[in-house]
Amino acid sequence: MRPSILIRFEETGFGERAILIDTTPDFREQALRFRIPRIDAILFTHAHADHILGLDDVRPFNYRQKQAIPLYGSATTLDAIARVFCYAFEEAPQGTAIPRLNMNPIGNESFELFGLKITPIPILHGKAPILGYRFGNCAYLTDHSEIPESSMHQLQGLDILFLDALRHKPHPTHSTVKNSLAIVDRLKPKRAFFTHICHDLGHEATNATLPRHVRLSHDGMKLEFEI
C-alpha cells in the first residue's frame, strides 16, 4: 500500500496518543487491517494525491473521539488540501457528515504535540520543497530527490531513519537505492528503512543486497524507539 506511518506513544496524564503522517488513498484499508485505535493529529509531507486522498476517511475517528482532528503541514500543502476537500471547510450547512478538521500551518521550526517534539525537515521533491519529520530518535523522509545540507545536520544521532528509495533507475523527483544508501552511510543511523518503493524492487531480492541495518519497509511493520 501507499507509504504512511503512525506514531503511537504515551502522553503523561492521558494515555496513548497516535499521530499519523499522510493520509494515502489506502488509508481506510490500512486503518481497518491494522486496527488503528485513534488519530489525534495528522502531519502532511506534501499534497500529492498519493499522500492526501484518504483524508475523508478520518470521519469515523471524529465520531469515536467526538472532536476535530488537527492537521499540520506547510501553508502550501494545507491550501491544496483545502481546495481538494473544500466541502470539509465550507461554512454553509452540510446535508451529510463531513470530516471535522482544524488547519495548522507550520514552518521549519520545531513544535510540540501531546508532549512529543516534532521537527519539520525541509527536503526537495524534484524542484518542489516538501517536509519530512523528526520525532525523538526517528526521522521520516519520503518523496525526496535531494536533502539540503542544512537538513542533513538535523538528522544526526538517529536510531531509525526512513528514506525514499523508489528504484535503482534514476528518477527526477525521487531518490534511488544507491543514493539513499549513500545518505545512510553519511548519517549512520542505527537502522534505516527504505519507503516509497516501486514494483521494480523485488522485496527479498533487494533486501539480500542491502547492509544488515538497512531494510525495505513493508505493510504492517512495527518498530520501537525512544522518543
Image: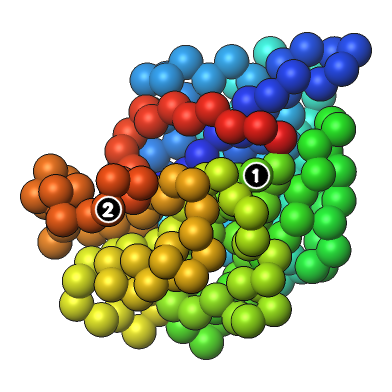
Q: Which of the image's four quarters has the N terminus?
A: top left
Identify the residue at image location x=46%, y=83%: 126
**Which element carries disc 1, helix, strand or loop?**
loop
Cα–Cα span, label 1 and label 2: 20 Å
Q: Which mark is residue 70?
A: none
Select label 1 or label 2 by which is in front.
2
Q: Amino acid at mark 1?
A: Asn
Sooner in the amino-acid sequence: mark 1 or mark 2: 1
Q: Which mark is residue 211?
A: 2
Q: Quadrant of residue 96?
A: top right
* Residue 82 seen anywhere in this rendered image of the structure: no
Kindly identify which residue carries mark 1.
137
Identify the residue at image location x=81%, y=44%: 117
* Residue 72 versus residue 79 in the image, above or below: above
Identify the residue at image location x=36%, y=46%: 213
**Which element carries disc 2, helix, strand or loop?**
loop
In the visual, does 153 lie left or right of 92?
Answer: left
